Every structure is written in C-alpha cells, then in structure tokens.
Amino acid sequence: MLRLIRLTTLVAALLATSTAAAHVRAKWPPWLSIESPVNPYDGSVTGAVLLVHAATREGTPTLSDVSGAAEGVVNGERRTIALRLDATSRPGVFAVRKQWPNEGTWLLRFSLASTTALVSLDGADRVTGVSVPTRMADGRPIPRAVVARDIDSTLMVASAH
C-alpha cells in the first residue's frame, strides 16, 4: 500500500512538473537576435552587414517566416525599403546585405511573428544598437507591437549622432 501511495505521489509530481513545463513553453514567444560583426571566415555570409538569428518554440524558422525593411530619412523624407534576407549555413540564421542607399539615416526592422527587432546603424553601416520592444507580463518581457513612434524616435536619435 505504501508503494502504491509513493507511486501515485510520484506520478502526480511528474504530471505537475510536465504541465508546468508545457505552460512555460506555451508562453515562450518567438525571438530575434542580431549578430555583428559577422564572421569573415564563413563563406555563406560574405558581404553581410549582420546576421539575424530567429528562434521559435515550434521549430526552426525559415526565410519565409522572417521579414525585414530598412527605415530611413533621406533629405528630410521618410523611406522604407523591403529587405531580402539570405539563408546561411546555419538553420534559423539569415544574412542581410546592404540594400539601402548611402545617403540619409537608416535603421533596420526585422519581424518574426509577434516579435520585431530594431537595429540602429552608424554612417558606415555598423550596428550601434539593437532593441526588441517589449512589455512586462507575468514578470517576463513579452515582445510588443512596434509602432511608427518607435521607428521615428530611433531614427531621430541616430540622426543626432
């Protein structure tokens, strides 16, 4: 009888643990991170300004899951240019080569489902900062929607430097 109680307790504890773990995984949002400088010894990223690392709990994201745009101000006018991302030798990692003009101030915006990363650049197209706008929920940062104000304020700060 004591063994049956211990076994029942063990099964209940395992179920509670697996349910808690599933609950944590279910709340894990897609995530983006940026790699710069790029490894000059990896031939699959030759000429890339930066690499975008995409991660989801459901598996490895593909090119069709990630989008990008260059957001800029050229001669006082706002411009948006859709970016092409290229596959690399690593799953879930995408290379971004320069596709925006030299003139003006630019930032790059990358999106994966509900997550967006804003990447600030200097005049030589080097990464100077990365932000994934978030809000707090259950004590954890959760990606939030990026609004025009986020892009405009990031461009304003970048143009002041």
Image (tube, grey):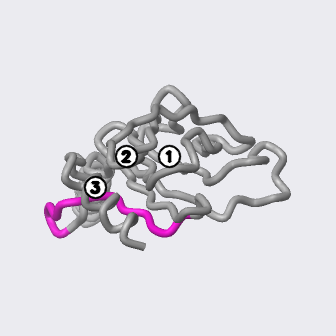
- Provide the residue designation for mark 2: 30
Distance (Cα) linking label 1 and label 2:
8 Å
In this picture, residue 48 sits left or right of residue 57: right
Image coordinates of residue 38 in percent, x first then y, are: 70, 59
Q: How crowded is mark 1: few (under 14 residues within 10 Å), some or many (20 or more)?
A: many
* Residue 24: image tag: 3
Distance (Cα) linking label 3 and label 1:
19 Å
Q: What stretch is highlighted in magenta?
A: 127-139
Q: Indicate which label's residue lies in the foreground, 3 or 1.
A: 1
Mark 2: amino acid: Pro
- Provide the residue designation for mark 1: 54
Judging from the image, what secondary structure is the residue with disc 1 in?
strand
Residue for point 55% across, 30% down: 63
Q: Is residue 122 magenta?
A: no
Judging from the image, what secondary structure is the residue with disc 2 in?
loop
Vertical order, 76 against 137 (above or below)? above
Image coordinates of residue 119 in percent, x first then y, are: 44, 57
Vertical order, 108 against 112 (above or below)? below
Q: In which quarter of the image is residue 111?
A: top left
Mark 1: amino acid: Ala
Residue for point 58% across, 36% down: 85
* Quadrant housing the C terminus: bottom left
**CB atoms of marks 1 and 2 within 8 Å:** yes
Mark 3: amino acid: Val
Q: Indicate which label's residue lies in the foreground, 3 or 2.
A: 2
Residue for point 36% across, 62% down: 131
The secondary structure that dominates the magenta segment is strand
Vertical order, 14 against 56 (above or below)? below
Image coordinates of residue 81 in percent, x first then y, are: 45, 34
Q: How crowded is mark 3: few (under 14 residues within 10 Å), some or many (20 or more)?
A: few
